[in-house]
Image (cartoon, helix red, strand yellow):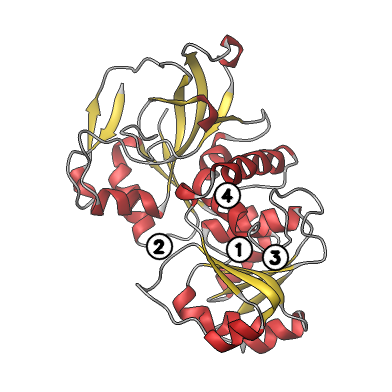
């Protein structure tokens, strides 16, 4: 089978198209014929900064069809369309290959009316978004329709992959969604995703605009740039709000201590790979339910333009993500 592999860390050119044997699933595992592989920032960061122990196949997310199962997995799963999550986390086999073997729970049923493109775009972004929306005190552990009714969510960077997923999941759960963007084009993408209110922080007084929309403050902040936005987040947060940050735009950032104390404001770090197992299970279940309800979409009409590459150009796909392509970068494997 064709696969992208690398044996040393470095730039995208450390990856090469290779031939590998088709793997056999073991106990509790499934083999998936990969159709589409999704690329996330952690994929190129892992390749660039972490030397693999052997031959590594990149990419955490993907979609495809189960074509074989190992002992302990029902034969009825053969032929099932699935989306994949964290394929390469702690493992040598990511989704940038024609067949991947992974634990059965990490291959989740994908409805017939959901595209493989959508399946490959879930994984890290959607599971991260779910976690950011479920860490508030008194909030739901698992999203569902109405679970965030009466709450206001601020999504920083609504045109990004996690921001897009957060907007769609928050809307599905009944929240009022406000998002900040850096310009009109990204504003249109955030609106397409379903944001109720869009604030261009370069053209508007973001704090004043958000306070005008939510006079009592926002209950949850989904934050992509905590260092740049800490003062804004503090200024618009409701009492007992949470700022859930999932990216590091700086090695460190200053928390506004006194305002955070008086407002009982919580700053919550989120790394999807290391969240508690129960939280991961809740996220997978909720994302699956949202997909089944048609509440998560991809493509320009959903605010997430797709950028496609063939398997042989996985390096170019990684570079596109590293260069902050707006939308979702996908690799056509089959």
Between the C-alphas of marks 1 and 3, the distance is 9 Å
In which quarter of the view is residue 163 placed? bottom right
Residue 245 drawn at (x, y percent): 52, 66
The residue that label 4 is drawn on is 126
- Which residue shows up at 33% across the image and 17% down it? 22
Circle 1 — which element?
Answer: helix
Query: In front of the other: label 4 or label 3?
Result: 4
In the rendered image, which residue does mark 1 sit on? 189
Quadrant the C terminus occupies: top left
Label 2: how many Cα within 10 Å (few below 14, some 14–19, many 20+): few
10 Å neighbourhood of mark 4: few (<14), some, or many (≥20)? many
Q: Nearer the viewer, residue 88 or 116?
A: 88
Q: Earlier in the sequence, mark 1 or mark 4?
A: 4
Q: Which mark is residue 324?
A: 2
Between disc 1 and disc 3, the foreground one is 3
Q: Residues within 10 Å of mark 3 (few under 14, many from 20)?
A: many
Q: Is mark 1 in CB contact (under 8 Å) with mark 4?
A: no
User: What is the secondary structure assignment of the residue under circle 3?
Assistant: loop
The quadrant the N terminus occupies is: top left
**What label does residue 195 carry, if any?**
3
Which numbered disc flags the more N-terminal residue, 4 or 2?
4
């Amino acid at each position: 089978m064709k696969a992208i592999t690398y044996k040393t860390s470095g730039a995208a050119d450390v990856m090469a198209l290779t031939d590998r044997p088709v793997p056999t699933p073991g106990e509790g595992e499934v083999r998936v014929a990969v159709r589409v592989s999704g690329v996330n920032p952690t994929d190129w960061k892992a390749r660039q900064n972490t030397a693999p122990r052997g031959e590594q196949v990149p990419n955490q997310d993907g979609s495809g069809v189960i074509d074989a199962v190992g002992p302990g997995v029902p034969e009825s799963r053969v032929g099932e369309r699935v989306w994949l999550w964290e394929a390469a986390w702690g493992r040598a086999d990511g989704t940038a290959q024609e067949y991947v073997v992974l634990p059965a729970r990490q291959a989740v049923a994908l409805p017939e009316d959901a595209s493989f493109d959508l399946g490959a775009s879930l994984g890290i972004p959607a599971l991260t978004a779910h976690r950011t929306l479920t860490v508030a005190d008194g909030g739901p552990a698992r999203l569902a329709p109405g679970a965030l009714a009466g709450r206001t969510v601020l999504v920083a960077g609504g045109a990004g992959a996690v921001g897009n997923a957060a907007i769609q999941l928050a809307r599905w759960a009944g929240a009022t969604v406000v998002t900040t963007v850096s310009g009109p084009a990204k504003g249109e993408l955030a609106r397409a995703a379903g944001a109720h209110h869009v604030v261009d922080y370069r053209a508007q007084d973001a704090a004043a605009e958000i306070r005008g929309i939510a006079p009592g403050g926002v209950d949850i902040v989904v934050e992509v740039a905590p260092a740049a936005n800490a003062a804004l987040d503090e200024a618009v947060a409701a009492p007992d709000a949470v700022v859930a940050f999932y990216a590091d735009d700086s090695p460190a950032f200053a928390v506004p201590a006194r305002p955070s104390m008086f407002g009982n404001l919580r700053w919550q770090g989120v790394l999807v790979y290391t969240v508690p197992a129960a939280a991961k299970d809740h996220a997978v279940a909720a994302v699956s339910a949202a997909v089944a309800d048609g509440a998560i979409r991809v493509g320009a009409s959903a605010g997430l333009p797709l950028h496609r590459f063939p398997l042989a150009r996985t390096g170019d796909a990684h570079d596109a993500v590293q260069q902050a392509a707006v939308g979702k970068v996908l690799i056509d494997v089959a």
